Image (cartoon, grey):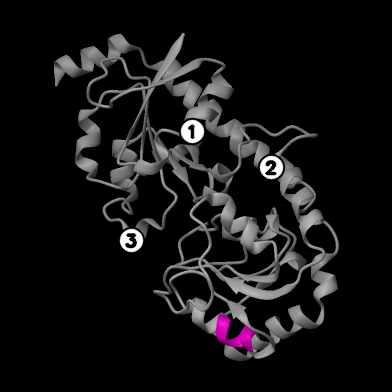
Amino acid sequence: MVLKIAYYNFWKDSINDNYFTRFLEFRFKEKIQVVSAFKCKDLDILISSCMGNIKFIKIIKARCKIFYYGENLNRFPPYNDEKILQDTFDLIVGFKPTNLLEKTIRFPLWLIYYPYYSYLDNDNILSYIQNQYDIKKINKNKYACLIARHDFGGQRKIITDVLSKWGNVDCPGLFNNNCSPIGPNPDDKLIFLTDYQYNICPENSKYPGYHTEKIFQALEAGCIPLYWGIDKPEKDIINENKYCFCPIENSVELSINILSCIDNKNIFLSGPVFKKGAGDIIKGYYDTLFTEISKKINSVSYTHLRAHETRH
C-alpha cells in the first residue's frame, strides 16, 4: 500500500523534507508518496497550513484534511476563526489543548524539530535533549546571547537591557546586531548557543499554548533560557528551575528574576530538565495524532469522495 499525501499553503522550504511525511511513514509502516493536491484523484491526506488562501481547500478532495499551524493564528486571519477551520478541516493540529469534539489536537511546533515519531523509554525526544543539556551545560566561555531578526513587540530589547547590566549580550541576528552572523544551516544556531551561559529566547507574541522551539533549543545547547510568552513554558513538561521567566510588564519583578538567575546559576543548572510524567504527555501527543488520522482515513473511501464530488 502507498499513502498519497499532499501539502498546500505550507512552508515551501519544508515540503521536500517534512516531519509529517516521515511521521506518517513511520507510524503507518507504509510508503508515502507526496503528490500534487489538485492533480491526485485518490488523495489520502492533505496537510495544509496558513500560508495562503483558505478558500481553495474545500475544492481539494482527500480522505483526511489536516490543518497544521506553527504560528500565532491571530496574525493570519481568517485562520484564527475556529468555525471556519472546523468547517474546512478534519483535524486542527497545533498549540491549543486537545479537544476531539472540536477536531483539535495539541502537537506543538517544537516536536517537529526533532526526528522522533513515537515515545520509547530508552530513546525519545526528552532523553535526547537531557543528554545534550548535560554535556553542554559545562565549560561555557561566554556570557549571554540573543538570536533574532526583529523585535516587533519590544520584549527582546526589554530583557536584553536588563541582562546587559551584568555582562555583554552578543546578538548575531539582524536585531541589535553586534557580532558576526551565524551560518545558514540549522545546526549553526545550536553550535553558536553552546558557548553561552544564558540565551534570551522569548516568543514573538502571545497565543494560547504558544510555546515554540526556542526554549528547547536553548536547553539542548546547555543554556539557561530567559523566556517570555503567554505563560510559563510547557508547565507540565519543563521543570521551572531550568529557565528564568521574564515578566516584561513588571520592570521590578523582571530585574529581580534575572538577578536571581545570575546569582543562583548552579541551582538553575542542577537537576533534570523535564518533570516526572513528561514522557506520558509526549507519548500522548504522538499517539493521539496517529490514532485520529487513522480513524479518518479508514472511515472515508475513495468511492465516497468521488460520489461527493459528483453530487457537488
Name which residue type carries label 3. Answer: Arg
Q: Which residues are magenta?
A: 160-164
Q: Image point 69% across, 55% down: which residue?
A: 220
Does the stretch in magenta take in 162? yes
Residue 225 x %, y %: 66, 68
* Residue 273 visible in image: no
* Disc number placed over residue 75 in the picture, else none: 3
Distance Cα–Cα, label 1 vs label 3 = 24 Å
Total count of labels: 3
Crowding at label 1, few (<14), some or many (≥20) Cα neighbours within 10 Å? some
Residue 161 x %, y %: 56, 87
Majority secondary structure of magenta residues: helix
Q: Identify the element where label 3 is drawn.
A: helix
Are the residues flagged by discs 1 and 3 in contact, CB closer than 8 Å? no
Residue 222 x %, y %: 73, 60
Q: Identify the element where label 2 is drawn.
A: helix
The C terminus lies in quadrant: top left
Q: Which residue is mark 2?
A: 125
Distance Cα–Cα, label 3 vs label 2 = 29 Å
Distance Cα–Cα, label 1 vs label 2 = 16 Å
Q: Which residue is mark 1?
A: 20
Name the residue nearer the viewer: 80 or 167. 167
Q: Earlier in the sequence, mark 3 or mark 2?
A: 3
Q: Earlier in the sequence, mark 1 or mark 3?
A: 1
Crowding at label 2, few (<14), some or many (≥20) Cα neighbours within 10 Å? some
Q: Image point 45% across, 74% down: which residue?
A: 175
Name which residue type carries label 1. Answer: Phe
Q: Is residue 137 left or right of residue 248?
A: right
Residue 70 x %, y %: 45, 50
Does the stretch in magenta take in 19? no
Q: Is residue 297 above or below residue 59?
A: above
